[in-house]
Image: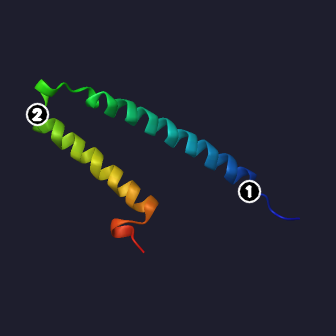
């Protein structure tokens, strides 16, 4: 009897939905300039965005096989 991947597919779809929700929230936060008005921007905000960017770069590099994850 062949094995099915129903459990893996269910887990995959659940994880994809969670990622989609996180991306949607990040896009909304970015559209709102990360809740920071131009007159309030300081180097702390820059550092926070750099941290976010670095983590996202790591993820996109892995997903698209770029940077240190290039073939």
Vertical placement of residue 45 versus 56, above or below: above
Please tell me how crowded label 1 is: few (under 14), some (14-19), or many (20+) other residues with Cα within 10 Å: few
Residue 45's tag is none
Residue 19 rendering spot, x and y as whole percentages: 50, 42
- Image quarter where the C terminus lies is bottom left
Identify the image quadrant of residue 4: bottom right
Looking at this view, is 32 or 55 the one in front?
Answer: 32
Number of residue marks:
2
Residue 27 rendering spot, x and y as whole percentages: 39, 35
Q: Residue at x 23, y 41 (%)?
A: 49
Whether tag 1 and tag 2 are in contact, CB under 8 A, the answer is no
Q: Give whichever of discs 1 and 2 has the lower sequence position.
A: 1
For discs 1 and 2, the disc positioned in front in the rendered view: 2
Alpha carbon separation for disc pair 1 and 2: 50 Å
Looking at this view, is 8 or 26 the one in front?
Answer: 26
Q: Residue furthest right?
A: 1
Residue 7 rendering spot, x and y as whole percentages: 71, 51
- What is the secondary structure assignment of the residue under circle 2? loop
Q: Residue at x 28, y 52 (%)?
A: 54
Identify the image quadrant of residue 26: top left
Please tell me how crowded label 2 is: few (under 14), some (14-19), or many (20+) other residues with Cα within 10 Å: few
Vertical placement of residue 71 versus 65, above or below: below
Residue at the disc numbered 1:
5
Q: Residue at x 28, y 48 (%)?
A: 53
- Image quarter where the N terminus lies is bottom right
Question: Is 49 displayed left or right of 7 in the figure?
Answer: left
Residue at the disc numbered 2:
42
- What is the secondary structure assignment of the residue under circle 1? loop
């Amino acid at each position: 009897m062949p094995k099915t991947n129903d459990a893996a597919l269910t887990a995959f779809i659940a994880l994809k939905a969670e990622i989609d929700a996180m991306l949607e929230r990040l896009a909304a936060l970015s559209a709102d300039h990360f809740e920071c008005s131009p007159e309030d921007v300081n180097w702390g905000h820059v550092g926070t965005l750099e941290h976010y960017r670095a983590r996202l770069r790591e993820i996109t590099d892995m997903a698209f096989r770029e940077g240190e994850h290039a073939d």
